[in-house]
Image (cartoon, rainbow, N blue to C red):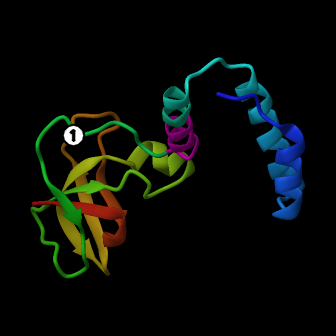
């Protein structure tokens, strides 16, 4: 990877009116990035993985051949197997819920209530999710 051109970076952030706190964080990350010898391919992979993990999105791919479709309100039933989208939540809720698989145990006021079936910790029973944050197993 070519070295970071910090003058260009600062000009880009100034023109885009990036907030000061955000800009400082970006510059700190780029300082570290500048010191890492990495190929173009590895750089793209590293940025994608870092971005997902920093935003508490899951990166683990399913090991089975299951097919998942967008869950839609009205098209879900008790007993269906669903998965929380990899980017459904941010922060601590994302760490707990993103990517988890569960069985629908109820539908309450539009929320989908699930019980996890993926043998991961913590076991969750009774979590409420919007159907827009779920994928349905076909």
Residue at the image position 16 percent from the left and 77 percent from the top: 75
Residue at the image position 18 percent from the left and 34 percent from the top: 63
Residue at the image position 81 percent from the left and 34 percent from the top: 28
**Image quadrant assignment for residue 87:** bottom left
Q: Main secondary structure of the magenta part?
A: helix
The span shown in magenta is 47-56
Q: Is residue 91 found left or right of 124 in the rendered image?
A: right
Assign the N terminus to one quadrant of the image. top right
Q: Residue 61: where, in percent of width, then height?
A: 28, 38
Q: Is residue 87 found left or right of 108 in the rendered image?
A: right
Q: Residue 41: where, in percent of width, then height?
A: 49, 30
Q: Is residue 112 found left or right of 25 in the rendered image?
A: left
Q: Is residue 116 found left or right of 49 in the rendered image?
A: left
Is residue 93 or residue 52 the one in the foreground?
A: 52
Say which residue label 1 marks. 118
Q: Residue 88: where, in percent of width, then height?
A: 43, 58
86, above or below 109, in the image: above
Q: Residue 100: where, in percent of width, then height?
A: 30, 46
Q: Is residue 54 highlighted in magenta?
A: yes
Residue furthest out toward the front: 2
């Amino acid at each position: 990877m070519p070295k970071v051109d910090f003058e260009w970076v600062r000009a880009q952030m100034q023109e885009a009116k990036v907030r000061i706190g955000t800009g400082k964080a970006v510059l700190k990350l780029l300082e570290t990035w500048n010191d890492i010898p990495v190929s173009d391919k590895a750089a793209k992979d590293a940025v994608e993985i870092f971005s997902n993990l920093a935003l508490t999105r899951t990166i683990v791919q399913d090991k089975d051949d299951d097919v998942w479709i967008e869950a839609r309100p009205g098209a879900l039933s008790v007993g269906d197997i669903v998965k929380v989208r990899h980017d459904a939540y941010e922060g601590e809720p994302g760490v707990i819920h993103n990517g988890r698989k569960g069985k629908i145990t109820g539908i309450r006021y539009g929320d989908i209530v699930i019980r996890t079936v993926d043998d991961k910790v913590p076991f969750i029973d009774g979590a409420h999710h919007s159907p827009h944050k779920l994928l349905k197993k076909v």
